[in-house]
Amino acid sequence: MIGRLKRRAEFLQVAAANRKWVAPGLILQVRRQPSPETESDDAPRAVRPKVVRAPVRVGFTASRKVGNAVQRNRARRRLRAVANEVLDVHAEPGTDFVLIARPATVDRNYQALVGDLVAGLKRLKLYREAPR
């Protein structure tokens, strides 16, 4: 399941993490979500609440450098399609991603965009193999 980043503050937190990968078709920014802290670490193991990893969350942005409104919307739609294909299956849970469109995003081959995102995940060590 993929959640969405919608507020500006969430985008700024991801950018402040200073982890990114630049590819010809997109820029990938990454931030680990803070782990939920257990209230009592002194409790026996059987009593401790089970820590569940938060789902992957993703946000999309395209500046005016990408082009006019039509091109920016097309770039965001293409990034959404790539993210749904790749992040849902291969992204490490509990991570926030921001995909930033570049001018080449609009015209780049779809499989090349998928390859850019997969390469970024592998480079940032957040890629996991698909469960069988």
Image: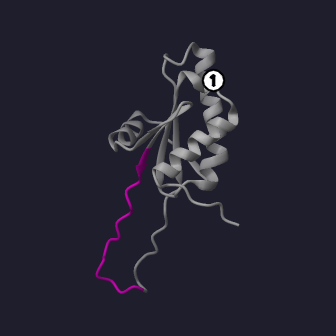
Q: Amino acid at mark 1?
A: Val
Q: Quadrant of residue 76?
A: top right
Residue in the image at 30% along x and 77% along y: 41
Residue bearing mark 1: 106
Report the side of 24 relative to 12 (left or right). Answer: right
Dividing the image into 4 quarters, which one contains the C terminus?
bottom right
Give how far across and how far down residue 3 sits, in percent. Answer: 55, 47
Report the side of 116 relative to 33 (left or right). Answer: right
Q: Nearer the viewer, residue 25 or 39?
A: 25
Q: Residues within 10 Å of mark 1 (few under 14, many from 20)?
A: many
Q: Quadrant of residue 80?
A: top right
Q: What range is drawn magenta here?
A: 30-45
Main SS, magenta residues: loop
Q: Nearer the viewer, residue 21 or 39?
A: 21
Residue in the image at 54% along x and 30% along y: 24
Q: Is 37 located above or below residue 41 in the figure?
A: above
